[in-house]
Amino acid sequence: LGSVTILIADDEPYIVRSLSYILQREGISFAIATDGQEALQMVRQHRPKIFFLDIMMPKKQVLARVKKLLASPTTGS
Amino acid sequence: VDPLRIFNSFKNKITFLIPGVGRLKIQSGDEIQELANEFNEMALKLQASHSSLEQEAAERTQGVAVVNKIARTIGSKRNFADRNLEMLIPIAEQLAIAAETIRLFEQTKKLDQLKSDFVSKVSHELRTPLTSIKGFTEILLSYQDIDLKTRQEFLTIINEESERLTRLINDILDISKIEAGKTEWNIQPLSPSEIVVHAVKSVRAMAVEKNLPIVIDVPESLPKIRGDRDQLIQVLDNLLGNAIKFSNSGHVTIQGVQEDRMVRISVIDTGVGIPDADIQKIFDKFHHLGDTRTGKPRGTGLGLSICREIIQRLGGKIWCESHLGNGSRFHFTVPLWLETPRNHPMTFERPAAPGGRDPDNINRDCGLNI
């Protein structure tokens, strides 16, 4: 499961659907999170390289921690 | 030390609203000391807001009302000599202008904040369906080999999101119009049962689709209410629509009872209910009731705000009781149509802004107790 390249973090189902359709067609691995808490978990678990992040989704307070994680040397690259 | 001389020297400094102005030290133990204390407080407040105050606001004439009031109050104190009074009036004048300036400044700041919050929320809400429409259109244009079923799914989403965008724009226009006082109200005596039956008709198809019976318990014998027919039907449509949307089994009941000089109408559902934390916020703009896990697109987030605005303008109240998993009860009241001499066309006043326009309140709002 370490091959996730992109994380889609958005609570709008249609936006998730359109992005994931394109990524699937292009053969790019991705993971989906629908709130800040899930996004944090996904970052820890999959170490994605690129984010599509909705900054106004639920539990967005956690996003500050996501940012911190990204800045740390173990995840940043 | 002559307290009044100290006062007089400070008066001139305050005139220029110099930041960092010192404090009056008067220990005369009478009204002058009291006034000096008020004066010191005002000077401190002025220092705090001086940098952002607008000169223009300082010249507002509303201050005159306070000047007069202060002058009157001072004038009624018999133990002041006329000479002293003359000296105090310009100080009071400055105090009044300062008080009014601070009030205007804080009111403007609050309104600006509310306005920019609304604008940023609106643009986010509009952008979301637009992003979906654009995204799926581009997908359909880019990939020529999408199977028929998926193609249909994407076109349906584009269609739904276009409709949502239209609803959003209509709702935003609606609420802006009501808030700006530009809605034309056609106030007339209305039969509660007649408008309920009419509203139920328009949501019946939705309820039939979900196999939800709608029980109407609004006696025809209820007295006439004072309201605007179209606006009240819009409120009922909204509440019934929500009740149906959030119920998957059971039924929706609509009740009407007379309570004192009001009729209370309640829309009761057996749906998912509302978490306690959300109850206070559901009438706020763009507080979505939708659950993202259902995978369903959300409403406009303005329906209940519009309901609240309408009911309040009609002189009633709207509130909600609910427990998660136990259904919701939305209630609203509308005043009875009473044949009193006040039956000429209604005028609607905006709810008093924080701070109020009443000049008599200015002293209190600024913490002045002269």
Image (tube, coloured by chain):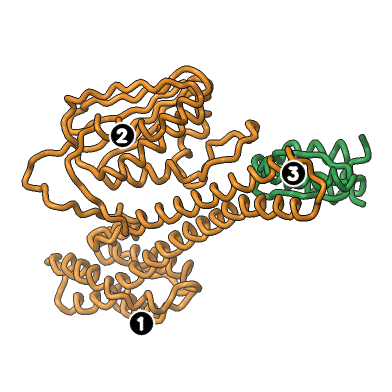
Q: Looking at the image, which residue is at 60% across and 40% down?
A: B297
Please check whether the numbered discs 1 and 3 fall on a single chain: no
Q: Which mark is residue B124?
A: none
Q: Quadrant of residue B335?
A: top left
3 and 2 marks in contact (CB < 8 Å): no
Q: Residues within 10 Å of mark 2 (few under 14, many from 20)?
A: few
Q: Secondary structure at mark 3?
A: strand
Chain coloured orange in this rendering: B
Look at chain A in the picture and name its colour.
green
Mark 3 belongs to which amino acid? Ala
Sequence-first tag of 2 and 1: 1
Q: Which residue is mark 1?
A: B12
In this rendering, the label closer to the viewer, 3 or 2: 2
B185 left or right of B58? left
How far apart are the two marked residues, 1 and 3, measured between alpha carbons? Answer: 61 Å
Q: Looking at numbered disc 1 in the image, what kind of residue is underneath it?
A: Asn
Residue located farthest toward the front when viewing the structure as drawn? B148
CB under 8 Å between discs 2 and 1: no
